[in-house]
Image (cartoon, rainbow, N blue to C red):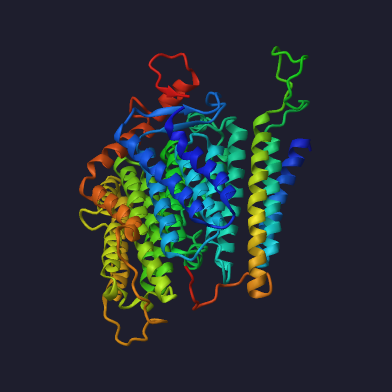
Amino acid sequence: MSAAVAFIAAPLAAAFLIPLLGTRASWGTRSASLLTLGSLLALGVWMLTHPVPPQVVILGGWRPPFGINLYVDATALMLVTLFVLVALAALWFQHQHGQEKPVSFDVLVLVLTAAGAGAVFTQDLFNLFVFLEIATVSAVALSAPQTGSPRGVIRYWLFSSVSGAAMLLGIAVLYSGAGTLNLVDLGARWAHLEAPVRWVSGVLILLGFLVKMEIMPFHVWAPATYRRAPSSVGLLLSGVVTGLAAFSAWKFFALVLRGGASLPPVSGVFSFSQALFGLGALTLILGALAMLAEKDGKRLLAFSTISAMGLVLMAISLGNPRAVRAALFLIFAHALGKGLLFFVAGLATSRTRRSEWDAWRGLGQASPSLVWFWFLGAATVIGLPLFPGFWGKLSFVGGALEMGLWGRTGVLLLIVATVAESVALLRVGHVLWERPGEPATAAEPPAACACGGVSYWAGALALIAVILWMGLWPSVFTRAFTSTQSAYAGRSPSSVARISTDAFAPRRAGLKQDR
Amino acid sequence: MNIVTIVAISALLLFGIGLYGLWSGRNVLRWILAVGLMETGVNVFLVLTGWRPGAAAPIVTEAFSTSGPLPFIDPVPSALVLTSIVIGLGTTTLALALAVLHGQEHGNLDCGDDPGTLEVLE
């Protein structure tokens, strides 16, 4: 059995065992949850520094396509390690700076991490649906406010439940036509299915992904949810939930829909890929413009997430190697940069008890590190040169320019959106740094700053280390993303289809598989 | 009209009634019931995908023989429905807890817009 299974099993086991230590949060429960995630982070780093060829892990002794199998390669490991890092940073932040939460908070973070790992690794469509639902239920429960109106989170529950039902209906329709749930097997049978089956299942399943990615017009739950939720939860929603939804959408798009080319054109005018591209473009530009008008810091970050996911969807729908590489880079850059931004937003909110960014004026005077962290996060998300977002956007431009008029339009929209996003984020950074004109500008006089020490900043420093690594030495990531893109497109000796099919028939020679 | 068509129409009707329930009001309890109806419709449809005329439950007995056509329904959709029911139970319970929170905060279950300025607790 591959060690990768530990990313699913260990957090789930810890989530069930930790409540036995006590239902109230204590030093013991906090240490156990941090230790679990810390161990997984160490395991992820160890596995990445001791690379093995991509492998298929067969679960329960049932060979695919009858059983569930996992596909583990460098990109999947990187993504899961990133999710663990973000979860660890969120949990650390909540323990250090947030209100005291019951032990269920730690349990839900662990369940969300396990679901994220499962969704990234699995090659079974229904299993993917289950992991996405577990992640969503955990995220909804984490977002519920301890006091105040839960209206935002009720909308989140509503949208995720309806999209989940639609996705399950799509899976049922697909299964009725194809008789399999294995993604590789589905991809092989897809072209032979009747057009209505392909259309209905394709649209319903993608709808599920789009809601979880916060793509317009299915995003309306997000701003209110982000605003009410603690910043640590905003970090998880933005860094883990949208990231795993985007990766899952790409997996379905690449393995089953084969880049959308196997679906009939919409009304004979534009293709399915172009329809998704248009939806992504709308999300990118409107999300960025909404940031300019937004007065609430957390809602502003929500719109930034929405806009970023719009760009990821555009890259996924383009489907060429550069665009896919861009999508993967952007998922990483977004999770890292947004982690820092939520870190600062959380500290500012907890000190002023207001989430309007204007109320954060002058906080950087007492704690300059807040301003530095904000600018580092903003530079990562915006894509300043030598920051992770830059490599993602550069790759996107390269991929889009290969696609003619649609692609050129996408590049133009990206430039406009980047300018709008830069103005919105740097404006908040300026306000943080600015001296307050009047002492009473904030809702309350800022509390004495308790900022200092490595343990205080540990979460942010870990994110910064990865940001600098990814920004200054992107070649490690580029190689992994290129290899994964080739594997999913079937252009590599270790392609997902090839080694999964080998797992279907185990007696073939040269098989690399793990049980 | 055969049994497959009748069950398929029933499943889609359940899904449609649920969808109408969502559009026709803003009461949280109505939304929870509507989503429950939609999920039931999907589960019925899922069971239907494994159905075969004249087939029995997929339980292997001593009388089972591999020769000839399989006398069982497809067991995979039944397993999927079990999982789906458990997920539905979890989400419904969570939604009911949120409805209780809403009732305590607003004194009713009408889920309108979120209030404007507010004090935020981390």
Instruction: Give the residue drawn at x 62%, y 39%.
Output: A172
| Residue A163, horizontal then vertical, whole percent | 57, 52
| Residue A424, horizontal then vertical, whole percent | 32, 69
Most foreground residue, A265 or B61:
B61
Q: Is residue A281 above or below residue A321?
A: below
Q: Report the label total.
A: 0
Most foreground residue, A311 or A369:
A369
Q: Is residue A28 above or below residue B98?
A: above
Which corner quadrant of the image does residue A303 belong to?
A: bottom left
Instruction: Give the residue drawn at x 36%, y 50%.
Output: A331
Which corner quadrant of the image does residue A126 belong to?
A: top right
| Residue A454, horizontal then vertical, whole percent | 30, 58
Q: Is residue A225 visible?
A: yes
| Residue B38, horizontal then vertical, whole percent | 67, 51
Q: Is residue A203 visible?
A: no
Most foreground residue, A42 or A512:
A42
